[in-house]
Amino acid sequence: MKQAADYITEEKRKELEKELKDLKGPKRKEILDALAYAKSLGDLSENAEYHQAREEQAKLEERIVRIERILESSEVVKGGGGEVIEIGSKVIVLKDGEKNEKTYQIVGSEEADMSSGKISNRSPFGKALFGRKKGESVSFETPNGKADYKIINVS
């Protein structure tokens, strides 16, 4: 597994496919209806409803293209479970100088969400952990200086 590649989990793929279906169906129709209504109001140059609907349409189409690109270019991974840290692995670490262990999951950049413990494989922390095993120590640079962690468990 290459660290720099784009990865998504099966769960994320299904979530994106569902969102794409919604955007291409009901959401697109909703915006087209809003555009039709705004056009019916007359003078388009000073029609705020029309300009708002066009902005929403542009955002929607941009999101559709982004999701399609993610689905086309990303590799779906089953996720971790081995001794070596890779995409999908759950990792328990202990930061030097602290007593409480923290659990993180290594995910592709599209799924990263630090508040729920999901770290991108492309983040400095994710890069430091990638390919390592239980018992090893890792270091990486943060805006506040060097951070040192010990890997307690990998699953």
Image (cartoon, rainbow, N blue to C red):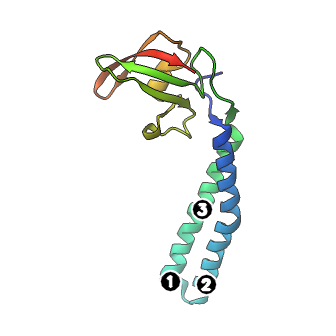
Q: Is residue 93 above or below residue 16?
A: above
Q: What residue is drawn where x is 50% and y is 17%? A: 153
Check disc 1 and report the residue beneath it.
47
**Kind of residue indicated by mark 1:** Asn
Name the residue nearer the viewer: 2 or 79: 79
- Which comes before the other along the chain, label 2 or label 1? 2
Secondary structure state at the residue bearing disc 2: helix
Mark 3 → mark 1, Cα distance in angstroms: 20 Å
Secondary structure state at the residue bearing disc 3: helix
Tell me, yes or no, whether the two marked residues, 2 and 1, touch with CB atoms within 8 Å: no
Mark 2 → mark 1, Cα distance in angstroms: 11 Å
Residue 139 in the image: x percent, y percent?
39, 16
Check disc 3 and report the residue beneath it.
60
Dot 2, how many residues are within 10 Å of its Cα: few (below 14), some (14-19), or many (20+)? some
Q: Which mark is residue 37?
A: 2
The nearer-to-camera label among 3 and 1 is 3
**Kind of residue indicated by mark 2:** Tyr
Q: Quadrant of residue 110?
A: top right
Q: What residue is drawn where x is 58% and y is 25%? A: 89
Q: Is residue 119 above or below residue 81?
A: below
**Kind of residue indicated by mark 3:** Leu
Tell me, yes or no, whether the two marked residues, 3 and 1, touch with CB atoms within 8 Å: no
Report whether residue 43 is seen: yes
Q: Which mark is residue 87?
A: none
The nearer-to-camera label among 2 and 1 is 2
Name the residue nearer the viewer: 63 or 134: 134
Which image quarter holds the N terminus? Answer: top right
Q: How many marks?
A: 3
